[in-house]
Amino acid sequence: MEQKFYTSLEEYGKPIDMSVIAVPTSLVRETVVSSLKAKAKTVVIITAGFKEVDEAGALLEREIADLCHSAGARLMGPNSLGIINTHHKMNAAFACHMPPMGGISVISQSGALCSAILDWAASRKMGLATVLSMGNKADLNETHFLAALVDDEKTKVIAGYLESITSGDEFIRVAESVASVKPVVILKAGTTSAGSRAASSHTGALAGVDMAYGAAFKRAGIIRADTFESLLDIAAALAGQPLPQGDRVAVITNAGGPGTMAADAVERAGMRMAALNPKTAAGLRDKLPAAARVGNPIDVLEDADPERYALAVEAAQADPSVDATIIILTPQAMTESAETARAIAAVVRGKKPVLAAFMGGEDTLAGRRELVAAHLPDYPSPERAVAALKAMLDYARWRQRPRRVVARFPVNRRRAERIITRQIRTGKTYLGEVRAKDVLRAYDFIVPEGRLVSTAEEAVEAAAHLGYPLAMKIVSPDIIHKSDVGGVKLNLSTDQEVADTFELMMVRIARRAPEAFLEGVYLERMVTKGREVILGMTRDPQFGPMLMFGLGGIFVEVLKDVTFYLAPITSDEAMSMLMGTRSYKLLEGFRGEAGADLAVIAEALQRISQLVTDFPQIAELDINPFMVGGLGEESVVADARIQLTAGEGRE
């Protein structure tokens, strides 16, 4: 069909809906102006050479964005691969492939990743819905596209690649709303550096970029992919299969080794190998060869034909004890991979997820293509199939979560406000142990009785009032890590020991921290019982207050066995923080040891959540250690510190 071409929009002379710009960088501005004069409501700039290059490019990018904004037009890019919509048969992208129609939509900050996904889809004949390359995000960003795709009935799954998020609060709000309707799988790159900010607390030191994004994704219900392969693995599973209703997995295989690999992977992922219903096992025993194994894994033997696989798949799906099925095929001399795939597809009922691992290369290629055509996700190994299924299960459980209800505790907020405001007015933003504990008392934390003293005589007098054993700690706004300079002494038990320790501590501090301003020492009744845990908060510039929990001692210092969650948190989320640590079993009680009062820890996390939500001036907070008693016993703040911001903080 003959098409007419124009040398300019002025020559065309009619209004346009969308302008796709792929001209040299020097011509982009005037092309945008021409597009806006032609009434374009969307401008897609494929051209590169803007803020990703230098400051001059950044200035030009901002100018173009302002032009579009003033004209009421939306800008995609620059440095974008473009946009593809298969269902509208629209290809406005700088890409080699036009994928078939499907249910996966892609948003990506990297054009190269879009190209790789398009090539992957083409090689597998995997259908996509929409591909959106955001480029530099001068205007439209991930939040806009998520909000648009949730209403797109052709999009079943949203897969994304992000290097940054434009607005953390808005992203979480929109992503949570979208994930409640359809799954969102994101691969987030650039998470290995915590930046150059110096952290004064354990929490701040442990909370890097990766932890912040992990906490944000967890809150929003986003499925986080760790690799490019897992991004595609999970998206394909969600696009083609229903969500599992439980964690009981049946494995069907024609080889013992891969079946064992799958069973190991299921257990490592925290799922269960299903115990087949006796009727299912009896039925399989009647119909399969005598040498076949009818436990779980179900071994249909090396010479399994398509009918044998179909029989086993039907049985597993019909079993009420099975929530999901993984089918493994390894190429043998008699294997018919394509015919087997078609036979499996013919009996899949679509009520429980079925994933396949057709292992090998050339000999299983035809079968893998048949699986894709039947919307059955296929993986090169059992482990990758299991990982995709686990992601589906986690998402299903998130969808079934109870409604979020954040408790509010009766506290003395005014008292905490006075302490914080007074400290900021002095120009000193560090609250040491004494004042930090005063703030925590206002939020109903139990703090041991103590006194601030400035002479050895005052120390002995205070000891007589407090009773032994005692802890003595230096108090100085200039000394954050007290033990590093000899500023902590525990288990003092006599008046002479108190006096001698005071004098020795003054000498040591004068030598090791001569510039430090000393307020005195703090004498406090020793906490002698309880499990040591650390509770904390650091305020991420993108997502706000992140709460931290971990066991104390070596678990936080060396193993870094901690979990993070965004405030405010619910009681269920607080308990999930505890269960998210590898050392959780130690808190429950182990080999006859009594467990810690888990409900008290969960409530303490919620109280910190309320405190840091009430006061955005709090930048970091540590309670380390928080001594947790057993059921019915007292749990006490043994040490604490708070770092404030000089301004009003982040709401």
Image (spheres, grey):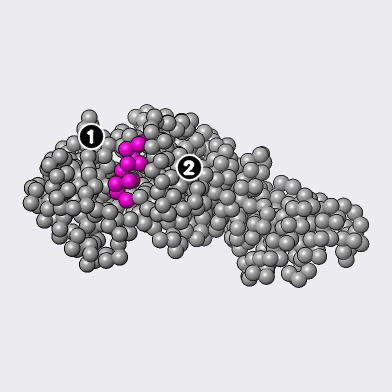
Asked whether the viewer can see residue 617, the reply is: yes
Picture coordinates of residue 519, whole percent (x, y): 28, 54
Res 466 label: none
Residue wearing tag 2: 219
User: Which segment is the magenta one?
Assistant: 432-443
Q: Nearer the viewer, residue 568 or 294?
A: 568
Picture coordinates of residue 317, whole percent (x, y): 46, 34
134 up-or-down from 346: above or below: below
Name the residue: 24% across, 47% down. 452
Picture coordinates of residue 324, whole percent (x, y): 44, 38
Question: Label 2 amino acid?
Answer: Arg
Residue wearing tag 1: 634
Question: Label 1 amino acid?
Answer: Glu
Badge 1 element: loop
Name the residue: 51% across, 42% down. 220
Name the residue: 72% across, 55% down. 75
Q: Are marks 1 and 2 in contact (CB under 8 Å)?
A: no
Prevailing SS of the magenta stretch:
helix
Is-magenta flag for residue 438? yes
122 up-or-down from 446: above or below: below
For disc 2, the neighbor class at 10 Å (few under 14, some 14 to 19, many from 20) is some
* 632 with respect to 441 (left or right): left
483 up-or-down from 312: above or below: below
